[in-house]
Image: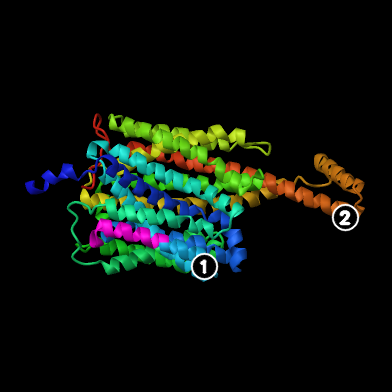
Amino acid sequence: MNATLPPLKPTYPVGAEKWILILTAITCAILELIDTTVVNVSLREISGSIGATTTEIAWVVTAYAISNVIIIPLTSMLSDWFGRKTYFTASVIIFTFSSLMCGLSTNLWMLVFWRFVQGIGGGALLSTAQSIIVGAFPPEKISTANAIFGMGIIMGPTFGPALGGFITDNFSWHWIFFVNIPIGIVAAVLAWTYVTDMTGAIKPRKIDWWGIVFLIMAVGSIQFVLEEGASKDWFQSDEITFFTFTAIIGLIAFIYRELHIDYPAVNIRLYKNYNLAMGSLMNFMLGLLLFGTVFIFPLFAQISLGWTATETGAFMIPSALCTAVSMPIVGKLLGNGKNPKVIILIGIIITFAFLFIMSFASPDSSQNDFYFPFVLRGVGLAFMMSPILSLAVAGLRGKDMAQAIGLANMIRQLGGAVGIALINVFLIHKNAEIRGSMISYITEYNNTSSDRVTALTQNFISKGYSLEDAQVLTYKTLEGVLFKQQALVSYNQGFLMVGLAILICIPIVFLIRYKKGVAAKPIADH
């Protein structure tokens, strides 16, 4: 055993080599996360270009999400099998080539297929990038590594809609994929040059094919249900019911299989580690918050306040920059031995404040009203993310570390999918409930309503419309006003709901075990 100890210290890269390696890894992680959201704002233009319906075009997003969440927990095993350097470089190439093919796609199912392949390459980039960044630092600097990776997690989903909106408005939808190509080519060259295989990694004796099959059944079906459930009216759809049962059967079979063989595809025995289990719950809530707010704010801004896609995306960038500034501060606090539980609690309170303020938006709200809340969002996420990453994998080594990173990323992605699905259901029900409540006041017996109808009708008559046409236009105008008002109230309540959900994290934080006076330093994967 002693023979394996001397190489530990020399394996850490130094100087320019270290920062080129980190920059390559974080760029690949950001690329992967950008592509989870960059397409969303371009779906309308894509559907018109390739002749797809609104329902069909959703598969462009769903295909990427499903392959992404399937491959993430398998990255540790595949990295050991092929070698981390080969696997990471190949993943960059797959992601880059499939980006080219997505941009060249001429019909829906060609685009869906290449988006699925892109997700396979992209999912591998996320967890392997984190493993590379963590491995570039000695254990005492691990909080800095998590802070750097955390910036990528925040920036990807935030920059995605802004980049997608800008490219769609000024070029064409094909370029949301083509922009990946030059970056991917450079990243592939740098990855092959600077990424090294994990020290001490052992090639698996066998591949757990059944475990992979059950994982695909379980996670793929869960992701499909969450992505498509709202549009298909959930369990009113035979398709959703079928995939729900498939997910349950696949999950049970997967857990049984992985616990009863000695070469599992995903080592779920790691969840015997108490902090990893608690950290996974926190990661799930983090995904819900990160992706949930990225989902709800653009809808709120564009529907209720009339912002463009580009304006909405650009507005969210300063929040990401606040996170980028806060992450190193949090990393330094953790490195100095500050209690990570206290830092997480501060992050939860700051984030709740952001969501609470957002729940009081009005039709007169402008960008100036949202700058401060979004500063809070950026700082709050920074204070939550890095300590959660550090606590969840604290004390794990080598292959266990890589497996834990894959599980943490998968759980966060699923948290985001669950968050979006729950918010979608909440908004649909709230819109119906609030509309029913509001419309009951629009009657001839309500003086305010009656006066508004009369004023609008007279206004249209004065512009030359007949009485009949004026009345039709009046009620169309009222319908538009009603829709904006009901949407605004629904989104306000949606922000509050997410805020209350985040408060659930407080008792989980107190359940995390932390030895006072010892910095949160997970062991690096070397």
Quarter location, residue 455: top right
Residue plotted at (27% across, 59% down):
86
Q: Residues within 10 Å of mark 1 (few under 14, many from 20)?
A: some
The x and y percentages for residue 201 are: 19, 55
Quarter location, residue 300: top right
The x and y percentages for residue 7 are: 14, 46
Residue plotted at (32% across, 52% down):
190
The x and y percentages for residue 130 are: 32, 48
Residue 244 showing in the rendered view: no
- Residue 105 badge: 1
Amino acid type, residue under disc 2 in the picture:
Asp
Q: Is residue 414 left or right of residue 89?
A: right
Q: CA distance from mark 1 to mark 2?
A: 46 Å
Amino acid type, residue under disc 1 in the picture:
Ser
**In this view, the mark in front (1 or 2):** 1
**Residue range corresponding to the magenta coloring:** 79-96
The question of residue 87 being in magenta is answered with yes
Give the residue pinned by disc 2.
469
Q: Residues within 10 Å of mark 2 (few under 14, many from 20)?
A: few
The question of residue 27 being in magenta is answered with no
Q: On screen, 227 above or below 138?
A: below
Residue 467 showing in the rendered view: yes
Quarter location, residue 312: top right
Helix, strand or loop at mark 2: helix
The x and y percentages for residue 475 are: 80, 51
Predominant SS along the magenta part = helix
Q: Is residue 463 left or right of residue 69?
A: right
